[in-house]
Each structure stands twice: as structure tokens, then as C-alpha cells.
Amino acid sequence: MDLHISLEGRGDLSARIYRQIMEAVLDGRLRPGERLPPTRELAPRLEVSRNTVAAAYDRLTAEGFLEGRSGAGTFVRAESRRPGRRRPSRGGVRPGRRWETPMAPPNDRAEFTFDFRLGMPDVRLFPLETWRRLVSRELRPASLRSPGYGEPAGHPALREAIARYAGVSRAVRAEADDVIVTQGAQQALDLIARVLIEPGDCVAVEEPGYPPARLLFQSLGARVVGVPVDEEGLDVSAIPRAARLVHVTPSHQFPLGTPMSLARRTALLAWAERSDRAVVIEDDYDSEFRFSDRPLEPLQSLDRTGRVIYVGSFSKTLLPLLRVGFMVAPASLQGALRTAKQLSDWHGDLTTQAALARFIDEGLLARHIRRATREYAVRHERILAALHGDLAEWLALVPSAAGLHLCTRLVPGRNVDVQRVVASARGADVAVESLAAYCAAEPAQHGLVIGYGAIPAERVDEGLRRLATALRAAT
């Protein structure tokens, strides 16, 4: 290990070496069992005598921090105390005012046998061996021709593949130059907001809606206003006149699941055109998985005045850890968005992007989606059966024909403590989410949102039986 020790200042050199190694052990930078540099190597690096280093090692060994092993060297003892890195209890540099109160929801990494949480595809469906082959191909010397950075908008082959794929599968009108590849859909939202929003600008979001989008816009100083959603989608008449951005999920409203009607889509585009400076973000996050009904035309294909930015993601179709999303932007915004992308992270992982381009071009993405849709359809049907059967006493289904989750509301007149249901279900190894978690307005809507991307089909029935028990206990 290349151990950094500073000898600046005055005083006993051996004592300073001793103190810095001891602090590294106590705060965990040096872990139990880790080997220290031999005294004959460390002494010349520090420009001190070997006896000076040896004296510090001997003192640390005597106090139980280090141990010598004959013929092997000096190591951190397994029993050495590590209470954690010491930090100032108060004072220090403060974050900006908008960041003093944590805004982001906690990242729940707990594992459950019966996992009905949202936004997680089944990693077991991912064609890992095929993906490994494609990535390995891109890591060959012949594929690493350019020594410099790539284009901020993303790998050219992937942009072309996305333009074709979105055009065929979703009727999105795009050329390769219209596509900007991002680190997931969240970065796409961030770049759009940075280019368009000034502090104090009004941004309209769906209510209930997607919390990370709302929190992102707030973090940039926007005044975020929730707009009600009904059975036809966003209530266009309730959008504030001053709104600069409108974030919508028209194909599969998050979290309710209802599609935006054609009348509402037309009305939203007309509103954006009248407002002159407004932009609509069409977040099409998981509509690839469709079990009935033909999808309506995306807003982007209906837009004739350059008001819509279409945002897509491969997190739900493939894997979240790939962190690949994209946007299709009007020509008037493309230059600013590319600049924002370059200033943010220059470009994403070009190896992953090149592999994904081949994955799409060879028809492997379409094949994967067909296979995954068949599997998700089985889970979707089992949950529907329970909602029309054992769970109908408490939960009323919000109709949905696509995506990886179903939303329910409490049956009118049912007095159920939903938070108690969620907690009780977790105690029974069942993870499910409250509809209220996606509401910013008061009073929150009451119900449960049931995801089926992460739970195997054979576990769905037992998980729902346990959920019914939790509902019964909370009634």
C-alpha cells in the first residue's frame, strides 16, 4: 500500500508517523489485516531514518494497533478499534439553502421475498451472456481507436439505433441528430431543467406524480405546482398560465397507470403553443410492456411547433445499473442541451453505448421485450385476479394496460390505515408501496401501488395472500 504520511511542521518525526497511522486505523482507512509498507521502503519515501519509522511501528504494535508476522511483515490487528471517522460536531461549510433539508427520498435497499415495489425490472430476464459478448467485442483493441473524448450527445451508432427503434416502436419522429444519450432519464430531466429553468420559474408536474422529477425541479429553484390527474390524464385547464415546463407521463401515468386521452394530448399541445415559451417533457418510462389496447400517439409525434422533448429510458426494459436514457429534442434546443451534457459529464460510458447499439440493431432488444412482456403479463393477470377477488373488499383497481405496476385506491367507505398495512406487510416479508408516497398535495390519495417487475410469478399469489392478511388486520 502507498501510505501517505505528512511530516510538515515541527516536532518528533516518529510521533507524527505514529499519530497518523493510528488515526488511519481508528477511522477505517487502514482496515484489519491490511499490510503496512516495510520500514526499509517507507523510510526513504519519507526521507527519515529507518529507526524513526521502526520506533513508530513498535509503539503501535505495543498499543495493539499493529502486529508483526514473522517473514510476512507488519499488519493492522483484527482487534484494533475503529469507531468511525471523526467529524466536526457543529459548524463547517453549509450547503446552499435549498439543500439544507434533505429532499430526496431514502433509497430502500432492503430485500424481500415478496417484492411488489415499483420501478424494478426482473434482472433474471436480462440476457447477461449476450450482453457480455457485446461488451467484450467493444473492448477489443480494434474497437478502441479514438484516444480522445466522445461526442457529448452520445455514441453515434446508438443515437442512430435509438432514432430507428423509437420511430418503429413508438412512432417518435427523430433523426440521429435529434437524439441525446444520457445517464438514465433522470439526467435527461436535469439537463432540460438546467437549460430552460431560472430560479423562480413555474414548473407543472402531475399530482400524484413522480417524486424524483418534482424534487429535481425544486433543487434548481423552480416553483413546482402539482396539476391534478383524472381518468383522462393531466387536467390541462389547471396548468398555471406562467408554467415554463410541464412534466407528464402520458403513455402510462405515474403512478396511476392511466393513459392520457387524445383529447387531453391535443389540448396540452394547444396550451403549450398559446403560452409561447412553455415546453412539455414527455416522460415515456415503461410503455414498452403493453398487455392490451393499442398505444395512443406520443405527444412528440403530434407536436408540430417544437414544444415537446421526448424522454426515454432503458432502465425498465433492461437494467437500471446500465444507466442509459435518452431524449429527442427540438432543433432549437439541441445545441444548448449538448453543451449542458458536456459540462455535466462530457459523455457517458461509450463502451456500454456501443454495445447497446448492437443490441438494438441485431434485434435483441425487441426479442427481449417480447419475452419479458410475456412474463410480466402472467404476473399482471395474477394481480388483476386478486384485485377482483380476495383484495376487492379493500382495494379498487385503477385501469391500466401497460407498464410494471398497478395502482389501487381504497374502496369508498373502507376505513383502512394504509401506512399500517405497509408496515405490517413488511413484517410479513412483503414490500408494497402507499399511493400517498407519490402525492405532494393534501389531503393525499389513499391506496396501494403494486409493482410486479421484481417478483417471480410463482411468488405473486402467496405475496398477495399475505397482503390481504395485512389489510384485514388494519381494517
Image (spheres, helix red, strand yellow):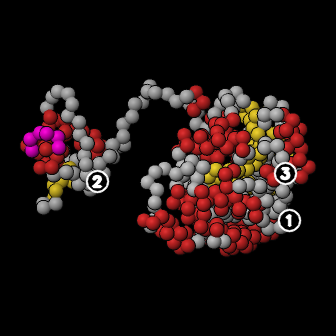
Q: Earlier in the sequence, mark 2 or mark 3?
A: 2
- Classify 10 Å Cα crowding around label 3: few (below 14), some (14-19), many (20 and above): some
Secondary structure at numbered mark 2: loop
Residue 32, disc: 2
Q: What residue type is labelled 2?
A: Pro
Q: Which amino acid does label 1 sit on?
A: Asp
Q: Looking at the image, which is closer to me, 328 or 100?
A: 328
Which percent across, then down, holds residue 269?
85, 44
- Classify 10 Å Cα crowding around label 2: few (below 14), some (14-19), many (20 and above): some
State which mark lies toward you, 2 or 3. Answer: 3
Which percent across, then down, holds residue 356?
59, 63
State which mark lies toward you, 3 or 1. Answer: 3
User: Does residue 80 lie above or below 72 as drawn?
Assistant: above
User: Whole-Å distance between the Cαs marked 2 and 3?
Assistant: 62 Å
Queried whether the magenta region covers residue 46, the answer comes back as: yes
Which percent across, then down, holds residue 326?
65, 52
Residue located beneath label 3 in the image: 302
- Whether residue 467 appears in this view of the structure is no
Q: Which residue is drawn at 88% across and 52% down?
A: 261
Which stretch appears magenta?
Answer: 45-50
Residue 293, disc: 1
Q: Looking at the image, which is closer to me, 460 or 378?
A: 378
User: Whole-Å distance between the Cαs marked 3 and 1?
Assistant: 19 Å
Q: Which residue is drawn at 17% across and 43% down?
A: 45
State which mark lies toward you, 1 or 2. Answer: 1
Q: Are the residues flagged by discs 2 and 3 in contact, CB closer than 8 Å? A: no
